[in-house]
Image: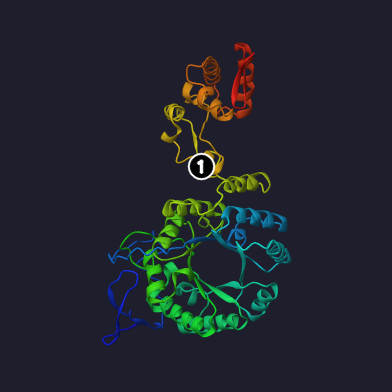
């Protein structure tokens, strides 16, 4: 419900758009008797629906936006637990990736096991300002004291906000849930700890009947205790959409507007936590940034519950595209992390995964390889060698053609400018004949690097040359 008695509310100047405005309505808790599960949008026995009302939300991107990490919390809920040593190694690399300006602002940890607590202590001993080590705990006084003893300034607290959770899981009414959450948060504040309120399942919640009134109360507590209270908008089931004019609670921009404008939560205290059930984790996270959310929560390679979270590496490049700068982030570490996961942790990254997959900038078509040979900008998204240490590659197969083979040799041996081979090179034409014979004989797999190198050595000797790193010499 909302208070419509605003005729006498003061008219003030909006400092952002320099227009006069009347204060927003005051939203109070709508303590319904039965759960509102938005059955018109979520019929369960049908595919969810995306209705529109064409209410447009203005762009409102904060001056400063950043990334937070949940690799060791949500990311650990869908894979074998990391060892303490692995957590510390990954944390070190996150620090390097985030750069001196702390673009990866925080990383959250479980505290339940000795292994997790040992990792927390070791990461805190590093003394890094960023990523700040934070926790995720149960909403209990005992856990708050544990957070304080460890020396953390902030912790995440689960405050589920949809009627699916309030009525069907917690078996409470909205008022009971609100009062319970506020008492727990007050306990946290009494310990001098800054709470980060995880509004679980916000994309199925009654935004103006529960979420906004709850946020209004949170901001009152923040004023009382003078301790920051963050609000994490959790798209737990991936239902969020970024379509202009879509209806809340599915509208990402509508949710952020409601938290910021109606709930009074400052942009720097709003965080978006997305899941990828409908392939929208990245676009929804970017949308949250654009419409007033300063922080986007991510996990490395999107590893997380069910379909996963927003991939951290994706948001690094989303930031660069929005802001026109990397702001000190060291993107080469992304490749180091991918190699560490595959070689040390045995984690298989799907080969087509953007930025980190084995084939993300590999071309197999001969016509594409011809374009790469002439100018790599034609078929490469940006200078992937400069930012990721991954130059574009042409896989050698029956469809590669002369251009694909020439490009593979040039990339593998770092042959550039005058040293680079063209399609008319003797070495290239002889290799093409060998490749054609292989596939004419029934081969169906691509040529592997090791066998290509061996064949290049063999053919090079026959024609009196030696191919080395960066140059070709006559024998």
Residue 108: percent from the left, percent from the top?
60, 65
Quarter of the rendering containing residue 365: top left
Q: Nearer the viewer, residue 239 or 271?
A: 271
The secondary structure type at the circle numbered 1 is loop
The quadrant the C terminus occupies is top right
Q: Nearer the viewer, residue 2 or 314?
A: 314
Q: How is the image coloured?
A: rainbow
As drawn, 341 above or below 153:
above
Q: Nearer the viewer, residue 460 or 100?
A: 100
Question: Could you tell me which residue is drawn at 62 percent across and 63 percent down?
Answer: 129
Residue 57: percent from the left, percent from the top?
32, 66
Is 438 situated left or right of 4 in this image? right
Mark 1 = which residue? 352
Question: Could you tell me which residue is drawn at 42 percent across and 55 percent down?
Answer: 283
The quadrant the N terminus occupies is bottom left
> Residue furthest toward the left?
7
Q: Residues within 10 Å of mark 1 (few under 14, many from 20)?
A: few
Residue 41: percent from the left, percent from the top?
36, 65
- Tally of marks: 1
Residue 105: percent from the left, percent from the top?
56, 62
As drawn, 376 above or below 114:
above
The answer to whether any part of residue 347 appears in the image is: no
Quarter of the rendering containing residue 448: top right
As drawn, 48 above or below 163:
above
The answer to whether any part of residue 375 appears in the image is: yes
């Amino acid at each position: 419900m909302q208070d419509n008695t605003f005729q006498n509310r003061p008219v003030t100047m909006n400092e952002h758009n320099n227009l006069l405005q009347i204060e927003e309505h005051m939203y109070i808790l709508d303590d319904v008797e039965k759960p509102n599960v938005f059955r018109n949008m979520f019929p369960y026995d049908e595919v969810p629906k995306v209705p529109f009302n064409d209410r447009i939300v203005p762009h409102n991107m904060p001056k400063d936006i950043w990334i937070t990490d949940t690799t060791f919390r949500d990311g650990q809920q869908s894979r074998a637990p990391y060892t303490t040593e692995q957590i510390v190694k990954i944390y070190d690399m996150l620090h390097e990736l985030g750069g001196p300006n702390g673009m990866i602002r925080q990383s959250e940890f479980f505290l339940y096991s000795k292994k997790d607590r040992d990792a927390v202590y070791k990461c805190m001993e590093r003394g890094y300002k960023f990523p700040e080590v934070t926790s995720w705990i149960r909403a209990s006084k005992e856990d708050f004291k544990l957070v304080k003893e460890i020396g953390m300034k902030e912790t995440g607290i689960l405050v589920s906000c949809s009627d699916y959770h309030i009525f069907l899981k917690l078996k409470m009414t909205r008022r009971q849930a609100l009062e319970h959450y506020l008492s727990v948060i007050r306990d946290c504040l009494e310990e001098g700890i800054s709470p980060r309120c995880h509004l679980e399942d916000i994309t199925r919640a009654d935004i103006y009947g529960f979420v906004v009134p709850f946020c209004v109360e949170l901001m009152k507590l923040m004023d009382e205790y003078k301790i920051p209270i963050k609000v994490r908008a959790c798209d737990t089931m991936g239902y969020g959409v970024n379509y202009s004019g879509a209806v809340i609670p599915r509208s990402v921009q509508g949710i952020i507007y409601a938290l910021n404008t109606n709930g009074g939560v400052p942009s720097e205290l709003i965080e978006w936590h997305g899941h990828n059930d409908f392939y929208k984790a990245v676009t929804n996270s970017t949308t949250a940034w654009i419409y007033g959310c300063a922080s986007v929560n991510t996990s490395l390679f999107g590893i997380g519950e069910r379909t996963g979270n927003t991939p951290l590496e994706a948001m690094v490049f989303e930031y660069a595209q929005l802001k026109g700068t990397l702001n000190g982030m060291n993107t080469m570490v992304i490749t180091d992390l991918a190699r560490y996961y595959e070689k040390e942790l045995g984690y298989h990254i799907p080969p087509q995964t953007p930025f980190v997959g084995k084939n993300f900038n590999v071309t197999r078509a001969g016509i594409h390889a011809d374009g790469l040979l002439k100018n790599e900008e034609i078929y490469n998204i940006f200078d992937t060698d400069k930012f990721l240490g991954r130059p574009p590659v042409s896989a050698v197969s029956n469809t590669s053609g002369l251009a694909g083979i020439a490009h593979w040799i040039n990339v593998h041996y770092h042959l550039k400018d005058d040293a680079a081979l063209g399609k008319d090179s003797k070495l290239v034409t002889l290799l093409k004949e060998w490749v054609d014979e292989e596939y004419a004989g029934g081969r169906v797999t691509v040529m592997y690097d090791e066998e290509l190198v061996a064949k290049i050595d063999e053919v090079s000797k026959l024609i009196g040359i030696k191919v080395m790193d960066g140059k070709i010499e006559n024998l």
